[in-house]
Image (cartoon, helix red, strand yellow):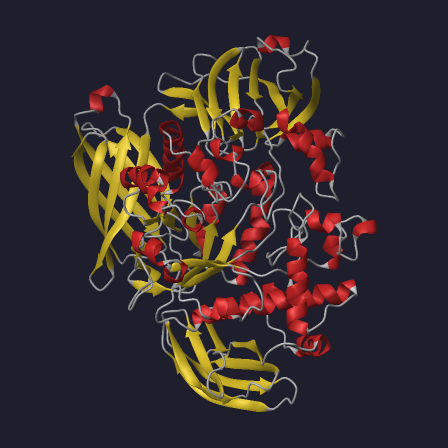
Amino acid sequence: MTLNGTWKLYYCPQGSCRIDSVTELAGAEMDSVPCTVPGNVELGLSAAGVLPKDLFWGENILLAEKYETYEWWYETAFDAPKAPDAEHKMILHFGAVDCYADYYLNGKKIGESDNMFIAQEFDVTHLLRHGEKNTLHVHIESALIRSTASDIEPNVAAFTWHVTTPSVNARKAPHSYGWDIMPRAISAGIWRDVALICAEKYDFRYLYFNLDSLKNEGKTGEVRMMFDADLKPEHLFAPLTYVIRGRCGDSVFEHQCTYKGGAGRIIFDVDDIRLWWPKHYGEPNLYEISVEVFSGAGEKILSKTVRRGFRTLKLDRSDIIEKDGRFRFVINGENIMAIGSNWVPMDVYHSRDKARYAKALAMADDIGCNILRCWGGNVYEDQAFFDFCDEHGIMVWQDFAMACHYYPQTNTFFEKLEKEAEWVVKNLRDHPSLILWSGDNEIDDMTTRLGYDPGKNHITREVLPRVLERLDPFRPYIASSPYLSPQAYQLGRDYYPENHLWGMRDFHKSRFYTDSKAYFVSETGYHGCPAKKSIEKFIAPQYLWPYFDNRQWNLHSTDQNNKDDRIMLMHKQVQQMFGEVPTDMDEYVTASQICQAEAKKFFIERVRAKMSYMGGVIWWNLVDGWPQMSDAVVDYYYEKKLAYDYIRRSSRDFIIMMGEMDIWGHDVLCANSSLKEVSGTCTVMDMDSREIVFEKEFCAAPNANTNLGRLNVMYSQQGMFLIRWKLEDGQEHFNTYLYGTPAYSLKQYQGWLAALPKEKGD
């Protein structure tokens, strides 16, 4: 039964009210408000009128900082059903609580937690009262006070990008303390579901499947099922019959065997196997699998039904940039061109994350993502996120929740991380979409820049690998993104096989981008201004325009120290592209979005033009987690920027594009990210003269680039090409290419935009 809904929330500055027993709450000199669970404390205060209704309007987010040093008491009452028999137990389940919490049932402390990422469960079978109300309290301390009280050792202070380091001791989303994409919001709350669960005492602890190999020309899969179960004592050492059945469409399998006990492995073949494939490469097939266990007398003693996908998986990589080097995913024996987005927090207040999944994930699918990288500054996403990715063929690269800090190298912290990693791995490992674990975000690169060997990070070199070796031995792992092998550490940034391309973010075709030798680009982005109607939803009228010396634009850039760095970066990118910066707001928004769109398109197509040795690009990023000026291509209110359409065209399974200028012209290239040959006809038209300057029938090889020919262009020329193709099945698509060098005419570019054809779905 759910315990979500309306609770009571008591609050005060931490330590100002002494509470020795939960019975003292009602009489304590504490403020209280009704609140909603799941929720964050700031949202409860906002709904009650203590804080403004819209915390994202203007500078309202700053008002919430007052409550960073408060403590909080959640309270509810409920009727509890009895466990039906001795073979069931009652579990009190908290999906996630932020962050330092004590739990009380009927006045008795039943547990504590210090991690906002993982679920907490308590067996309350013998603590529940039947026939009267049960009271439930959760006391949450100030994470800022608690983490600040912990020691910061010299190595942590020395080798981190942030000057202040209290966040490293708290297992909270790293972005909470302020980031370049999110405001400071050191929140608290019961932010995921609460439920009282009647659970079977005897059940499988896990069912873990792996496709070991493919044989019979890929038609048969050898599958290994590892399992562990709680059994009644009389079944512990007795021969049991295991029946495993699975179905995916018209592919059906059944395997039966006798096995003694409730733990071990069973290996069986699946004929006519339906493989799970990433988007573009095939169908994301999923099997419904039932596992039943029978005693020697034929009594069914256990049963469980799960959904699983079968695929082989390999991360094919070298430690440094070198001849024949690589960083690419190989699934079912095929090299995969990964194209997708970094997945960042859905909201400042994570109790609202799940409600934002549907729109954001639908956009990820529509825009053409076949990979999402769950960035290390975030939280671990809910099952609904991974279920969607399983069903839509979207690969998931999962960072552990650490980013841009050097975390404590103490046994206490190691134990905390090990517990977290165990929960995360067990919770997520059954999803076929999950293709990579990464120890953290950018910590290897950060420590290297600060003159420290990243190989000394025991968390990512020892703690996490130990957990993964035990609990998920068949999935690849890298210690950091980008990962620095000992060789790469010695040689420097030019030798990272997988890299984040940020640099100075000047013109998007500058040498920083074009000369990168990385085989896989796992972060790269470019600013784009939100639509004016979106800006009007979070910037007060008196601050709406212009953006110079504008504290609200600065705050929403994101910077809570009133710096204008990112605002002026966006300004300079427009100036670089068009030679001047519009003074009209509507024109500025358009110009900024054009800059972003061309940059994101270039980042993707530069990688797709090199399919023979590049493994993918994960651009930054799809959707904002709060209203801001950013690299996102969809703002917080789900308004799409121009880059959305450009990325969507550049991310199709098959595209025709232009190579970059080289010796009097451009190659006309196909990028075919599918396992089928693609045939059709292609034309290239100059958008100004309307002249067809290239025309050809083509047959493009599967999973490769095909060069269709060459188009003569001089450096002194400038314009836009419209590339159109018609496939044998009748589908028609188009792409564009902006040729020449800045400065371009904004008016002329707007004319090209207006003349572009419309496609189904645009």
**Vertical comparison of 698 with 462: above or below:** below
Please determine whether, in this image, residue 668 is positioned above or below residue 628.
below
Q: Position of residue 81 (x, y in %)?
A: 50, 18
Residue 758 image offset from top left, x and y in percent: 63, 74
Q: Quadrant of residue 227?
A: top left
Q: Residue at x 55, y 37 (%)?
A: 164
Rendering coords of residue 249 (x, y %): 37, 55
Q: Quadrant of residue 609?
A: bottom left
Compared across the picture, whether 481 is left or right of 591 comes to left
> How many numbered markers are drawn?
0
Q: Residue furthest right?
A: 542
The one nearer the camera, 296 or 265, is 265
Quarter of the image for residue 409 reads top left
On screen, residue 291 versus residue 533, left or right, reads left
Relative depth, front residue between 121 and 694: 694
Q: Is residue 741 visible?
A: yes
Can residue 604 be seen in this snapshot?
no
Location of residue 144 in the rendering, given as x and y in whole percent from the top left corner: 57, 28
Quarter holding the C terminus is bottom right
